[in-house]
Image: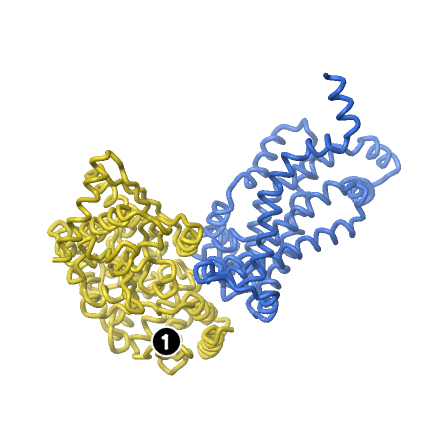
Chain colours: A blue, B yellow
C-alpha cells in the first residue's frame, strides 16, 4: 500500500507540489486575489446596489485623472514616499550600524536595541496621537525643545510646508526599528575576515562601508526598500489622525483620498479605481527598485 | 382608534414571544463616543434590565465612518435594527432607511405609539422627505460660549457677566490677552470642520443668507457677508492676537490657559472634570442675530432585509420609544437637549448641574430658533469638505479670505454640477 502511494506520488510529482501549496493558495485566493479582482471589477461600475449599479467602463479612471484633488493626492503620495523611505531606511541603517559597531558584548546594547525597536510595536493610532501631542504648538515636547533653544518653533501640523515632513518623521520613528533589526541580521552575516583584511590594507570605515557593508547588505536593503515603499504608498492612519489631510489638502495622500471617496462620499467605483491606481503604482515602483539594485539573483 | 389597535397588536406580538420564551435581540448602532456614548449605554442598560423579552445590543460606532458602515450593512443584508441619523444626512441616507410611515409591516409610528405632537414641530418635520417620514427626533445639539471665570477675574472682568455683544466681546478679549492668557478660540480643537462651523456662525449672524441657492444649483456664500465673516475668523488667529494658528481650544481651556471657547454641549463632562472654574453663555451677538451652529440626532430604522418579521419591527419601535422617553438621561449625561418634550421637562434633569449651568441656555437658543442646522444635500459631505479646506488655508494665512471663498465657491459649483 505504502509502495503504491509512493509510486503514485513519484509518478505525479506535480500533484504533490500542488497539494503542498493548496492551503496557502486557498487563503491567498480568498483574502487577496478575490478582493483585488473584485476591486478591479468594482472600478468599472458606478456602484449602487440599492438602486442598481451601472457599468461605466473606464469612466472612473478618466474622472480620476481629471480630478485636481486626485492628482494632488497622487503628488503628495510621491512627496511623502520621497521623504519617508530614505528617512526610515537611513535611520534603520544608522541604528543597526551603531549597535553593530558597539559589538554584542558591551553592556546596555540589548536595552538600546529594545528601545529603538519598541515604537514598531505600537499601533498607528498610538503613534499618531503621540506625535500630534509632540507637535502641539502649546503643549508639545518638540515645541518646548525649540523654545528652550530660543528658536521660534514652526507650527508643524498646520503649516503646509512642514506638515508632510512632520508626518514622515513620525512614520520613520515608528518603522525604522524593524528595518534596524533586518539590517542587523544582514550585518551579522558578513564574514568578519573581510573587515580584518580590509583593516590590514588600511581601509577606513567609509571604505569598509562602501565596499563591504553596502554590497553585502543588498538583500536586506532590497527587502527593506520594497517593504518601505509599499508602506509609504499605503500611508493612511497617521495622516488621517494627525492632519486629516490638511492644512488645506497639503497632506492628503492617495489612501486618504480613497478613504474620503469611499467612506465619506460613498463613490465606491471611483474609490476602487483609485485603489487600482495605487496598486499599479506600488507594483511598478517595487519592480523599479529591484531593477535598480540589480538583485534579480537574490529574488530568484 | 387606529393607534390603540396598533398598540394592542404590538402587545399581542410581544406577549406571544414571551409566551414562547423567545428573547428578541435588537441591534442598535450609534456614532456616539465619550460622554454621549456613556449616556446612551445608561439608557439601554435600563431598558435591558427592565425587559425580559427584548434585549438590545448596543454598538457605539466610530463617528467618522458610521454612515458608510450603516450603508454597507444594509447592502450586505445585515443592518442593525435601530440606528442614528443626523437630520442633515437624511437626503444622503434616504435610500438606506425604512420609511416609518410606510414600512413593509405598516405604519411604525402608529405601531410604536409615537406621537409627533410630543416633539417640536420643526424637529419632527426634519425627519420627513418626499412625502415619507424616516426619523424619530432624539435631540438638538449645538455650540455655546464656555468661559473661564478665574481668568475673567484675573483680567478684571465680571465672572458672572460673560460678553454678549460685539463691543463687550472685543473688550473682554483684549483684557484677557493683556492678563497673559489666550483670549478666545472659536473652533473647539481647530479641525477644519470646526473652523467651518465657526465661520458659519459669523456668516449667519451677518445675515449672509443661505450657503447655496434654493435648488442647490450654485454656491451663494461668496458674498460680502461671507468675506466679513471669514476675515473676522482669520483675524482672531492672525491679527487680534487672541489665539495662535494650530492651537487646540479644548486643551487650552482644560489647561486653564484660555479665556473663552466656542464648543458643543458635549464639552460639559470634560469641562466639569477639568477642574477649571467655568461658566457657559449663549454665543454672543457679534453681527446682528446671535445664531449658533447646531444639528439634531434622530433615531432611524435602516432598511431591513425582505421578510423581516413584524415582531422585530415592533420590538425596535418599543426600544425607540423607550430611548426618547428616557432622553432626560441623554441630556443630563450626554449634554444634548432632548427633543421629547416630556423628557425636557423631567424634574431630575431640570435640577441637574448640567441643566442649571449650561443646558438651559442651549435649550433657550434652540427654542428661539437660533440654532442653524447644516446643509442638507446628497453631496453635502463633499460640499462641506470643499468649503472647510479653503477656510483652513485662510486661517493658516496661506491664502487671502477672498481667494479662499472664491476657490471654495468654484469647487462647490463643480460638485453641484456633478463633476
The reply to whether residue A152 is visible in this rendering is no
Secondary structure under tag 1 reads loop
Q: Which of B154 and B219 is in front in this view?
A: B219
Q: Name the residue under label 1.
A: B211
State how many labels appear: 1
Please give the name of the residue rendered at 51% of the width and 59% of the height, measured from the top-left corner.
A268
Relative horizontal placement of residue A193, taking residue A177 as reference (left or right): right
Q: Is residue B46 above or below residue B136?
A: above
Q: Which of A261 and A42 is in front in this view?
A: A42
> Chain letter of disc 1?
B
Please give the name of the residue rendered at 41% of the width and 72% of the height, measured from the top-left corner.
B234
Q: In this view, does B74 lie above or below A61?
A: above
The reply to whether residue B230 is visible in this rendering is yes
Relative horizontal placement of residue A93, taking residue B29 as reference (left or right): right
Q: Is residue A166 above or below residue B387?
A: above
Q: In x, y percent, where is residue B249?
A: 36, 59
Please give the name of the residue rendered at 58% of the width and 43% of the height, measured from the top-left corner.
A31
Q: Quadrant of the N terminus of chain B?
A: bottom left
Q: Nearer the viewer, residue A89 or B325?
A: B325
Residue B245 occupies quadrant: bottom left
Q: In x, y percent, where is residue A161?
A: 56, 64
Q: In x, y percent, where is residue A9?
A: 75, 26
Relative horizontal placement of residue B371, taking residue A124 as reference (left or right): left
Amino acid at each position: 500500500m505504502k509502495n503504491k502511494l509512493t509510486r503514485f506520488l513519484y509518478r505525479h510529482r506535480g500533484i504533490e507540489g500542488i497539494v503542498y501549496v493548496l492551503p496557502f493558495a486557498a487563503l491567498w485566493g480568498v483574502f487577496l486575489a478575490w478582493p483585488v479582482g473584485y476591486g478591479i471589477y468594482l472600478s468599472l461600475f458606478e456602484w449602487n446596489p440599492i438602486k442598481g449599479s451601472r457599468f461605466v467602463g473606464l469612466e472612473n479612471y478618466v474622472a480620476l485623472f481629471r480630478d485636481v484633488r486626485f492628482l494632488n493626492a497622487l503628488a503628495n503620495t510621491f512627496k511623502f514616499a520621497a521623504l519617508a523611505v530614505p528617512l526610515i531606511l537611513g535611520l534603520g541603517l544608522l541604528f543597526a550600524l551603531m549597535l553593530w559597531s558597539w559589538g554584542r558584548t558591551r553592556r546596555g546594547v540589548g536595552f538600546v536595541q529594545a528601545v529603538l525597536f519598541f515604537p514598531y510595536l505600537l499601533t498607528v493610532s498610538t503613534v499618531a496621537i503621540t506625535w500630534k501631542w509632540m507637535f502641539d504648538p502649546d503643549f508639545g515636547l518638540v515645541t518646548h525643545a525649540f523654545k528652550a533653544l530660543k528658536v521660534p518653533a514652526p507650527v508643524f501640523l498646520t503649516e503646509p510646508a512642514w506638515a508632510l515632513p512632520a508626518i514622515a518623521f513620525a512614520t520613520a520613528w515608528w518603522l525604522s526599528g524593524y528595518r534596524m533589526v533586518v539590517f542587523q541580521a544582514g550585518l551579522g552575516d558578513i564574514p568578519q575576515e573581510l573587515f580584518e583584511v580590509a583593516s590590514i590594507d588600511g581601509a577606513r570605515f567609509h571604505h569598509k562601508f562602501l565596499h563591504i557593508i553596502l554590497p553585502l547588505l543588498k538583500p536586506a536593503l532590497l527587502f527593506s526598500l520594497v517593504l518601505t515603499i509599499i508602506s509609504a504608498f499605503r500611508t493612511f492612519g497617521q495622516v488621517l489622525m494627525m492632519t486629516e489631510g490638511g492644512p488645506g489638502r497639503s497632506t492628503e495622500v492617495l489612501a486618504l483620498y480613497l478613504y474620503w471617496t469611499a467612506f465619506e462620499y460613498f463613490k465606491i467605483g471611483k474609490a476602487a479605481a483609485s485603489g487600482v491606481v495605487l496598486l499599479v503604482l506600488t507594483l511598478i515602483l517595487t519592480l523599479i527598485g529591484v531593477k535598480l539594485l540589480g538583485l534579480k539573483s537574490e529574488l530568484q | 382608534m387606529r393607534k390603540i389597535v396598533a398598540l394592542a397588536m404590538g402587545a399581542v406580538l410581544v406577549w406571544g414571544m414571551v409566551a414562547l420564551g423567545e428573547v428578541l435581540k435588537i441591534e442598535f448602532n450609534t456614532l456616539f463616543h465619550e460622554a454621549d456614548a456613556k449616556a446612551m449605554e445608561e439608557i439601554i442598560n435600563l431598558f435591558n434590565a427592565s425587559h425580559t423579552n427584548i434585549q438590545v445590543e448596543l454598538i457605539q460606532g466610530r463617528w467618522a465612518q458610521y454612515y458608510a458602515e450603516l450603508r454597507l450593512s444594509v447592502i450586505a443584508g445585515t443592518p442593525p435594527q435601530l440606528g442614528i441619523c443626523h437630520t442633515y444626512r437624511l437626503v444622503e441616507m434616504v435610500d438606506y432607511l425604512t420609511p416609518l410611515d410606510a414600512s413593509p409591516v405598516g405604519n411604525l409610528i402608529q405601531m410604536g405609539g409615537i406621537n409627533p405632537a410630543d416633539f417640536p414641530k420643526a424637529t419632527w418635520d426634519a425627519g420627513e422627505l418626499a412625502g415619507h417620514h424616516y426619523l424619530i427626533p432624539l435631540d438638538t445639539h449645538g455650540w455655546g460660549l464656555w468661559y473661564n471665570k478665574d481668568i475673567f477675574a484675573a483680567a478684571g472682568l465680571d465672572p458672572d457677566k460673560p460678553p454678549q455683544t460685539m463691543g463687550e466681546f472685543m473688550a473682554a478679549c483684549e483684557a484677557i490677552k493683556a492678563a497673559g492668557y489666550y483670549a478666545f478660540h472659536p473652533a473647539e480643537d481647530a479641525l477644519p470642520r470646526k473652523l467651518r462651523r465657526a465661520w458659519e456662525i459669523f456668516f449667519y449672524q451677518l445675515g449672509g443668507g443661505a450657503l447655496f441657492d434654493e435648488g442647490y444649483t450654485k454656491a451663494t456664500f461668496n458674498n460680502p457677508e461671507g468675506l466679513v465673516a471669514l476675515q473676522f475668523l482669520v483675524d482672531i488667529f492672525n491679527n487680534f492676537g487672541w489665539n495662535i494658528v494650530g492651537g487646540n481650544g479644548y486643551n487650552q481651556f482644560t489647561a486653564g490657559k484660555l479665556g473663552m471657547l466656542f464648543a458643543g454641549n458635549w464639552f460639559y463632562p470634560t469641562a466639569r472634570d477639568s477642574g477649571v472654574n467655568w461658566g457657559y453663555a449663549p454665543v454672543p451677538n457679534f453681527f446682528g442675530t446671535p445664531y449658533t451652529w447646531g444639528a439634531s440626532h434622530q433615531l432611524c430604522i435602516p432598511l431591513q432585509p425582505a421578510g423581516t418579521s413584524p415582531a422585530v419591527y415592533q420590538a425596535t419601535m418599543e426600544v425607540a420609544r423607550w430611548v426618547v422617553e428616557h432622553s432626560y438621561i441623554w441630556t443630563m449625561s450626554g449634554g444634548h437637549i432632548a427633543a421629547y418634550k416630556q423628557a425636557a421637562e423631567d424634574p431630575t434633569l431640570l435640577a441637574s448641574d448640567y441643566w442649571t449651568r449650561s443646558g438651559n441656555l442651549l435649550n433657550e437658543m434652540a427654542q428661539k430658533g437660533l440654532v442653524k442646522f447644516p446643509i442638507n444635500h446628497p453631496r453635502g459631505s463633499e460640499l462641506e469638505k470643499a468649503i472647510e479646506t479653503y477656510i483652513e488655508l485662510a486661517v493658516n494665512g496661506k491664502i487671502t479670505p477672498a481667494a479662499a471663498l472664491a476657490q471654495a465657491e468654484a469647487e462647490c459649483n463643480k460638485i453641484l454640477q456633478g463633476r
